[in-house]
Image (cartoon, rainbow, N blue to C red):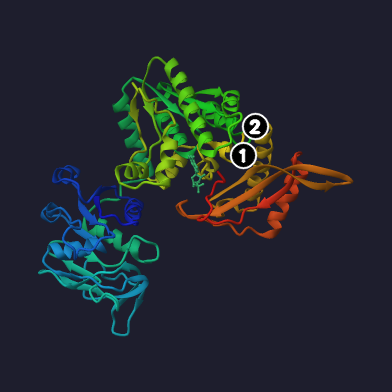
Amino acid sequence: KILILDFGSQYTQLIARRIREIGVYCEIYSCECSDDEIRQFAPNGIILSGGPETVTRGETPRAPKIVFEQGIPVLGICYGMQTMTEQMGGKVEASAHREFGYAQIRARGHSRLLSDIEDHTSAEGYGLLDVWMSHGDRVVELPEGFMLIASSDGAPIAGIANEDKAFYGLQFHPEVTHTKQGGRILKRFVIEVCGCEALWTSSNIIEESVQAVREQVGSDQVVLGLSGGVDSSVVAALLHKAIGDQLTCVFVDTGLLRLHEGDQVMATFAEHMGVRVIRIDAEQRYLEALAGVTDPEAKRKIIGNLFVEIFDEEAGKLTDAKWLAQGTIYPDVIESAGSKSGKAHLIKSHHNVGGLPENMTLKLVEPLRELFKDEVRKLGLELGLPADMIHRHPFPGPGLGVRILGEVKKDYADLLRQADAIFIEELYRHDLYDKVSQAFAVFLPVKSVGVMGDGRRYDYVVAIRAVETIDFMTARWAHLPYDFLDLISRRIINEVDGISRVTYDISGKPPATIEWE
Ligand code: XMP
């Protein structure tokens, strides 16, 4: 297994995902972790990530000395290479001009890390690689025992190696897909240099998790808040496999779910898989709690608090339950450990109210804690969950509660559900669903005039929204074909009695957000 020490690069998680894709287990630790933590993890190799600081200033982070004293391979990427250089006695220089974007490097000499990996061959016979650079500082003097293995115009020392110690440094980023051979380089490092075996596969992960859960909970009863989202669904399937009837799922139907969503959850888990699921029909309670409330944040709070209240009531009835299962995944763990804050953090806290009573007497079982989202999806498929459930667009915890602008009413929710279902159905039919990251309808409680046949209509408006994004922090509106939008508009206005106008949302994030509230 591989240890990644994080110096704050936005790409650190990407390094971890690439290593896992190769089939090797890895974890991310802060660069300030203790010697004991490193020894205890007992990695076969260490990767030092990039970072925003400069090693030319004294007070910036360095790799713990122990990293270089374990007799195991080390790969420094960008800042990681610079701090390795500085700590081994070489020299790094600050530079005013940043090199950012594509660059071509020449692979020099024969290093174990780069030999025979190239995109092109130069006239002089060097391997040439198209890589992604993002740095200001650069290495200007090799540390003793190191040789030059790559150079570019912007960074004459773009790669270094000490073959005796198996220490390597790369100025470019092998973890981003813009570096075409990046996957091969990382694979070369973890498999050949570090000697790791590619054993991290879905079926192995399932087998190990099943064992671990059985050991952890023994013969105790476990309760899980099932939402129908990917993470809690995979936890349900995994725990069902591990402990069968010791698992009870509580599914709160808020009345703010999509069309037939509640029935689908029950069909998949209760009927098809034989999981014990208690369905709580809470529509009325939600509507009463939300009556007259228009402020988005107030609505979110009410919805979240009511969820905890109801979940608590139900979990309290299961007097034997000793464990609470949660769908916490690795990015949540990294995020809450780090200092990242802001939006992502806020969303997580919403997410996790999913059943964390304050005076909790239940112990936590979190079988996905070490997994990235794409790994969770693979696991879900392997566990037999339906592919469309696994690849469904994200749906916010407060559900339609934040897609009905202003006050939430049952008739609004019913109209919105129908419009949304038409949109999603057509996205699937036209093979567009997987081409957008998130798509949905929003209910606008304003009326506009229309004509239909000889009659005049005075009905509500829905907005259609579809976005493309990698991380949901920024997004562009999806350029869906006009003919497709035309079809959506016709179908919704013809089929949903109460909607007389459809608009398409052409706002990017920023400045808009993905949801309307
Ligand atoms: P925004 O609207 O902030 O949304 O651009 C970014 C992503 O987060 C989802 N979202 C939420 N998820 N609870 C959630 O669990 C919430 O309160 C919430 N608000 C937004 C949104 O659907 C999008 O995927």
In this picture, residue 380 sits left or right of residue 138:
right
Query: Which numbered marker is on residue 404?
Result: 1
Q: Nearer the viewer, residue 349 or 44?
A: 349
The quarter in which the C terminus is drawn is top right
In this picture, residue 119 sits left or right of residue 292:
left
Residue at disc 2, CB closer than 8 Å to ligand 1? no
Q: Nearer the viewer, residue 400 or 184?
A: 400
Q: Which residue is mark 2?
A: 409
CB within 8 Å, label 1 to label 2: yes
Instruction: State whether residue 168 appears in this view.
Output: no
Residue drawn at (24%, 49%) of the image: 30
**Callout 2 environment at 10 Å: few (<14), some (14 to 19), or many (20+)?**
some
**Callout 1 environment at 10 Å: few (<14), some (14 to 19), or many (20+)?**
many
Q: Which mark is first along the chain, 2 or 1?
A: 1
Q: Secondary structure at mark 1?
A: loop
Amino acid tagged 1 = Ile
Instruction: State whether residue 72 appears in this view.
Output: yes
Whole-number angstrom distance, CA of label 1 to CA of label 2:
8 Å
Q: Nearer the viewer, residue 243 or 63?
A: 63
Residue 9 is situated, as x and y percent measured from the top left of the image, at 31, 57
Amino acid tagged 2 = Lys
The answer to whether 380 is drawn above or below residue 44 in the figure is: above
Residue 159 is situated, as x and y percent measured from the top left of the image, at 23, 70
Q: Secondary structure at mark 2?
A: loop
Residue drawn at (51%, 45%) of the image: 391
Residue 305 is situated, as x and y percent measured from the top left of the image, at 47, 28
Residue with the most extreme bottom position:
123
